[in-house]
Image (cartoon, helix red, strand yellow):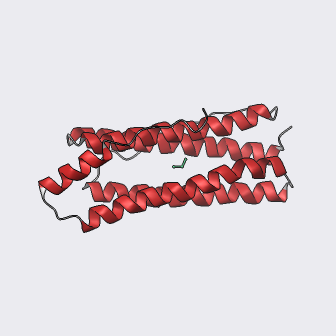
């Protein structure tokens, strides 16, 4: 049976993961409006990943005889000035999510919940990847020359991203 404090915090994290999906869906639509299909594809995969994170947390609560509670999801921003500004926000957002995950680890430690800690290990590793991916794209956009051709080339690169369900 999951401890009340961890259940409450994981339910909060489910909301944060669903907000992340909503934020990236909004970014996907921003890129779609710019006809940058590869950038939009990258965000679409990100939406799927965040949904998978929420499901993974929900599965953990259900597997431990708890109860998943959904709460309202905040509206995401809808406009950005440039692809670079979008990815700077992605990077900042993922750093925030990392600190939320670290907070969950602390709660699981306080509760001496070994199962919870084991489950959270996956998320700790995942956040390293999430931050790396975002930072890499921020750096590419910063060093890229500002021509249409450079942006188109990056768009082709991001079109290749494919979703792999981590819960499968
Ligand atoms: Fe669910 Fe992007 O962290």
Q: Position of residue 150 (x, y in %)?
A: 17, 56
Judged left or right of residue 35, residue 70 is right
Question: Can residue 137 be spotted in the picture?
Answer: yes
Figure quadrant of residue 26: top left
**Observer-nearest residue: 155 or 69?**
155
Residue positioned 56% across, 55% down in the render: 127
Q: Is residue 141 left or right of residue 110?
A: left
In this rendering, would 13 be left or right of 110? Answer: left
Answer above or below: position of 146 versus 36: below
Is residue 64 toward the left or the right of residue 163 in the image?
Answer: right
- Residue 65: percent from the left, percent from the top? 82, 31
Q: Residue at x 20, y 53 (%)?
A: 151
On screen, residue 29 above or below 109: above
Question: Where does the image place residue 134, in percent across and percent down from the top left?
Answer: 42, 57
Query: Going by the picture, which residue comes out furthest to the bottom?
Result: 143
- State the image coordinates of residue 98 (x, y, percent, origin top left): 58, 58
- In the figure, 42 relative to 89: above or below? above
Q: How many marks?
A: 0
- Please say if 24 is above or below 67: below
Q: Residue at x 45, y 39 (%)?
A: 47
Q: Identify the residue at image location x=29%, y=52%.
A: 80
Query: Residue 70 versus residue 101: which sits nearer the camera?
Result: 101
Q: Quadrant of the N terminus?
A: top right
- The quadrant in which the C terminus is found is top right
**Observer able to see residue 75:** no
């Amino acid at each position: 049976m999951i401890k009340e404090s961890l259940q409450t915090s994981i339910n909060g994290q489910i909301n944060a993961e669903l907000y992340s999906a909503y934020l990236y869906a909004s970014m996907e639509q921003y890129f779609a409006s710019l006809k940058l299909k590869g950038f939009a594809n990258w965000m679409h995969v990100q939406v799927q990943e965040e949904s998978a994170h929420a499901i993974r947390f929900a599965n953990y609560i259900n597997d431990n005889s708890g109860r998943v509670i959904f709460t309202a999801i905040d509206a995401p921003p809808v406009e950005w000035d440039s692809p670079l500004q979008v990815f700077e926000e992605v990077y900042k957002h993922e750093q925030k999510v990392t600190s939320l995950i670290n907070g969950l680890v602390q709660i699981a430690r306080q509760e001496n919940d070994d199962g919870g800690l084991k489950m959270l290990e996956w998320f700790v590793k995942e956040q390293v990847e999430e931050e790396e991916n975002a930072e890499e794209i921020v750096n590419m956009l910063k060093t890229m020359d500002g021509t249409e051709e450079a942006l188109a080339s990056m768009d082709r690169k991001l079109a290749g991203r494919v979703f792999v369900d981590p819960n499968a």
